[in-house]
Image (spheres, rainbow, N blue to C red):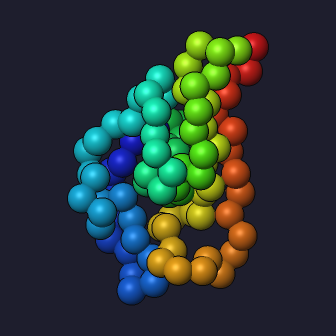
Amino acid sequence: MTSVGQAGNDRSRTIADMGLAGETLRMDRYLKPSTPARLTNQADGSWEDGVVVHCWLSEEISAHHCYVAFFGQAIPEGQPAVKPYILDTRPVH
């Protein structure tokens, strides 16, 4: 995950708008709910912005396991117009 972004409109916020541009989030640390996150496609540079919904230390994977709700190009302020999808960060064995 990375946090490079573009400015949002009056109904949405991007990672850059929140003052987090350039910060890289590691998958091995606890992220509190509401922490902004960005999933970047390394192949084409496209991204989706989201927020951490839940995170806990998993003994099964010996790391933190998080659920992240993704909204697309920007995180909406207030009620989202479209239901986000939830990404499970657990590594696949």
Relative height, residue 53 to residue 43 (above, below): below
> Does 87 sit left or right of 76 as displayed?
right
Q: Residue at x 39, y 42 (%)?
A: 2
> Which quadrant is the C terminus positioned in?
top right
Relative to 83, does residue 43 appear above or below in the rendering? above
Rendering coords of residue 85 (x, y %): 71, 57
Query: Image point 46% across, 33% down: which residue?
Result: 30
Q: Is 27 in front, or is 59?
A: 59
Question: Which one is in front, 19 or 60?
Answer: 60
Residue 52: image location, x then y, percent: 54, 49
User: Where does the image place residue 55, in percent across and percent down from the top left?
Assistant: 57, 39
Q: Residue lying furthest bottom in this view?
A: 10
Residue at the image position 33 percent from the left and 51 percent from the top: 4
Residue 37 as seen in the image, left or right of residue 87: left
Asked if one can make out residue 48 in the rendered structure from this viewpoint, the answer is: no
Q: How many numbered callouts?
A: 0
The spot of residue 8 in percent (x, y) is 38, 74
> Residue at the location (55% across, 19% down)?
63
Report if residue 68 is visible in the image.
yes
- Taking depth in this image into account, of 88 and 34 the one nearest to the observer is 34
- Residue 34 vs 28, above or below: the answer is below
Q: Residue furthest right?
A: 93
